[in-house]
Amino acid sequence: MATQAQDIVGSPNRLARVVSHSLSISPTATFHSPPSSFGGAQLTRTITAPKQLKPFDTQDIKILLLENVNQSGRDILAAQGYQVEALKTSLPEDQLIEKIRQVHVIGIRSKTKLSEKVLREAKNLIVVGCFCIGTNQVDLDYAARHGIAVFNSPFANSRSVAELVIAEIITLARQLGDRSNELHRGTWNKVSSKCWEIRGKTLGIIGYGHIGSQLSVLAEAMGMSVIYYDILNLMALGTAKQMPTLSALLNDADFVTCHVPELPETKNMIGADQFEQMKQGSYLINASRGTVVDIPALINASRNGKIAGSALDVYPSEPGGNGDYFTNDLNPWAEDLRSLKNIILTPHIGGSTEEAQRAIGVEVGEALVRYVNSGVTLGSVNLPEVNLRSLTMDEPNHARVIYVHHNVPGVLRKVNEILGDHNVDKQITDNKGDVAYLMADISDVRPGQIKEISDSLEALSSRIMTRILY
Ligand SMILES: NC(=O)c1ccc[n+]([C@@H]2O[C@H](COP(=O)([O-])OP(=O)(O)OC[C@H]3O[C@@H](n4cnc5c(N)ncnc54)[C@H](O)[C@@H]3O)[C@@H](O)[C@H]2O)c1
């Protein structure tokens, strides 16, 4: 994709000149790809290839990446010819405001807060890439109401979490954490009592989504029997078996592991009643969200021997940075938890691997390119998810109209009146709350008409943002 885009552009400077004479080059208003005459040579070579829609000269797109975004993401964006500035840290609010005014795209991780105050200054911004899982550092609602799409990467670290859980299953079964701690303190304690192989044991997975299903495959490969419980009826991988109820899973599993989202229904999903239903001497693992397990109930079940070991990676309250924070000030039971035997406590590192960071860079980088170059919102967390088949190289006089607007009656009629003189080849619209997203591919458009269409759409009272790609 990148190679082809560069080939077509050919002479970026020339393109920039052509554009600045004919059209506004604000990316919030009008975008265009090189005139079709640029692609003459390619046309015969890649006759059925998707046409690379470009927002004027890609070199005009300014991107700011903060917090040391992974190289994989930087490379994808730089390969498009965008101007990419990458900083290792986040920025204080005043500097962030200064910088965000100039950019069309910003890439952040969890430390940069894009509040309404900051976004209000981001007059050129069309998209935010959160190179992480969470998006609560961004005012998603404000962004949506101003036509700024937000993307993240919720699943790129699933494999890393699944592997951590496999490691924890063996570590708990063999009491490795305690043996290691003892030897660190100088105590040789060679025991086999209550230490087990995991072969032939039953793993109960609660939540059979991205992580739970990966884990299912890995656990079976090590000779475990897998059962799972999910609110959805999901096809089993390998010889895993879906259980009809949570109780049925808890009754049968030697190891119980939680992989559900944080929801009101999953709060304290594993509490005193559930520990009662678990097998004597079974194990509990939670690397999902801290609210899923009632920790005081876990402490009781561990002290009375019902639970032989546990591993926690997530907690109801977690500190904002590294340091000596895992105390009763953070969570009132922290010190009781730390004093238990055979418990692995990790600081929310389930997804923290080099591979996951790289995968996040690729996923978010590609989503940003797709959005900037062709308006596709698949995977956006705050705008409706809209996709439209790519234009092909044999559709030279087509334009793609993107109109983000307030979700009020009568908009489609007005938009279609504006597009009416052209052939609307395909059109799609969807809404999320108060914001709607319309994409239409129209044919027989002369370059001079593009500005006319853009201006007419911009004049509608429903308008949030208009972009035209061709
Ligand atoms: N420890 C970490 O570093 C780390 C990293 C990534 C994800 N996570 C967390 O792991 C959890 C699972 O992530 P995922 O990517 O597999 O999510 P997912 O959305 O792919 O899967 C979640 C599954 O849980 C099921 N589910 C929802 N509510 C349920 C309920 N009440 N009872 C039973 N099943 C229910 C869903 O149907 C779905 O199949 C999430 O909480 C996520 O935030 C933690």
Image: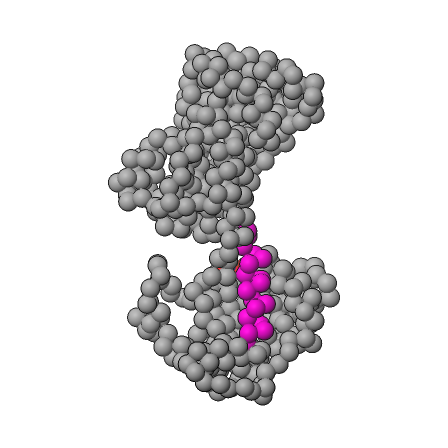
Identified at 48% across, 57% down, the residue is 352
Q: In the rendered image, which quarter contains the N terminus?
A: top right
Residue 453 is a magenta residue? no
- In the current view of this chain or complex, which residue is farthest to the right? 239
Q: Quadrant of the C terminus?
A: top right
The x, y position of residue 174, in whole percent, is 57, 79
- At 51% from the left and 21% from the top, the residue drawn is 32
- Dominant secondary structure of the residues highlighted in magenta in the image: helix
Along the viewing direction, whichever of 453 and 252 lies nearer the viewer: 252
Residue 392 quadrant = top right
Task: Note whether 409 is above or below 453 in the view shown.
Answer: below
Up-down relation of residue 374 to residue 419 (above or below)? below
Location of residue 3 in the rendering, given as x and y in whole percent from the top left corner: 59, 29
Q: Residue at x 52, y 32 (%)?
A: 79
The picture quadrant where one finds residue 97 is top left
Q: Is residue 250 visible?
A: no
In the rendered image, the vertical position of residue 301 relative to residue 60, given as above or below: below
Q: Name the one closer to the observer, 460 or 32.
A: 32
Residue interval drawn in magenta: 155-172
What percent of the width, then of the height, locates residue 464? 42, 31
Ligand 1 image-quadrant field:
bottom right
Report the residue at 45% width, 71% height from top. 345
